[in-house]
Image (spheres, grey):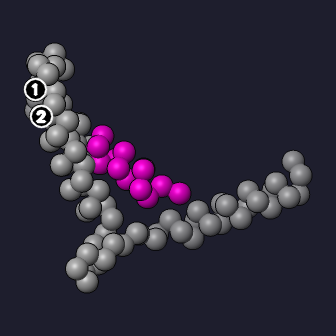
Amino acid sequence: MSIARLRNTLILALAAVFLAACDPMLSIEGSFWPAWIICILAGLATSMVLMWQLVRYRLAPHLGPPLLIAPSLWALCTFVIWLLFYSI
């Protein structure tokens, strides 16, 4: 392993350690909100639209119990939104 590659790896590792506690904050109407709250709300809205589409196209009965599918879809949408907007 070359010295330059080792140095870059060390810099990235140190940046990851020091930036791990940084929480992205959004200013909404002058009030700072943690970004995860925004992602949860956006994930809820997205999952509701997706569930509506699944019901509309009559695919929901083929997926399984709605009590399991709806929260799983909500979590999936929330995590995807977080990764799209706040991943490094």
Q: What residue would you read off at disc 1?
A: 56
Which residue is pictured at 29% across the width and 56% down the height? 39
Q: Is residue 73 above or below residue 29?
A: above
Q: Is residue 23 above or below residue 57?
A: below
Q: What residue would you read off at disc 2?
A: 52
Query: Could you tell me which secondary element the residue under label 1 belongs to?
Result: helix
Q: Residue 34 appears at what percent x and percent y?
A: 31, 69
79 falls in the magenta region: yes
Q: Is residue 77 above or below residue 19?
A: above
Q: Are marks 2 and 1 in contact (CB under 8 Å)?
A: yes
Q: Can residue 71 be seen in this snapshot?
A: no
Per the picture, the main secondary structure of the magenta-coloured stretch is: helix
Closer-to-camera residue (61/15): 61
Q: Quadrant of residue 86?
A: bottom left
Q: Is residue 67 above or below residue 16?
A: above
Closer-to-camera residue (54/87): 54
Name the residue type under label 2: Trp
Closer-to-camera residue (70/10): 70
Which residue is pictured at 21% across the width and 56% down the height? 41
